[in-house]
Amino acid sequence: MSKKLLLSNVPYDCSDDVLRKWIEDQGYAVVSVKLIRDVVSGTSPSFAHVQLAGTTKLNDAERMLDGRILRGRVLHVRRGVPGRNPVAQRDSFAAETTRTI
């Protein structure tokens, strides 16, 4: 099982190192952080992939990091799905949370 998380609503001025340190400060061991960047402009559309160390419980990390505030923005955290576009994951999440009962 992948130990990757997809973070959305990451501050635009956030760097890989800042995000890594913030997650480590929350008590999680980080293997890698990769902010998704536009290839032309170099700016981040506020998505990041974070790979956690093997001993980390992914469900706990997802639950504890989701809704936390980083630089004034509320982060949204989901388990990463290999090979899926972050925008597609965001849209599927929006569809799940807006269903009527």
Image (cartoon, grey):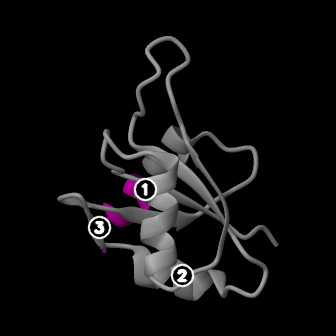
The earlier-in-sequence mark between 1 and 3 is 1
Residue at position x 47%, y 66% in the image: 21
Instruction: Answer whether residue 92 is visible to the viewer in this image.
Output: no
Task: Give residue 100's mark.
Answer: 3
Q: Position of residue 75 (x, y in %)?
A: 34, 62
Q: Which amino acid, mark 2?
A: Ala
| Left or right, 24 with reference to 43 | right
Region rendered in magenta: 94-101
For the residues bearing labels 2 and 1, Cβ distance under 8 angstroms: no
Name above or below for residue 42 compared with residue 7.
above
Q: Label 1 vs label 3: CA separation?
A: 38 Å
| Left or right, 66 with reference to 69 | right
Task: Give residue 61's mark.
Answer: 2
Secondary element type, mark 1? helix
For the residues bearing labels 1 and 3, Cβ distance under 8 angstroms: no
Q: Position of residue 39 (x, y in %)?
A: 56, 17
| Left or right, 101 with reference to 33 | left
Q: Nearer the viewer, mark 3 or mark 2?
A: 2
The residue that mark 1 highlights is: 18
Secondary element type, mark 3? loop
Q: Residue furthest top?
A: 40
Residue at position x 31%, y 40% in the image: 13
Name above or below for residue 88 compared with residue 20.
above
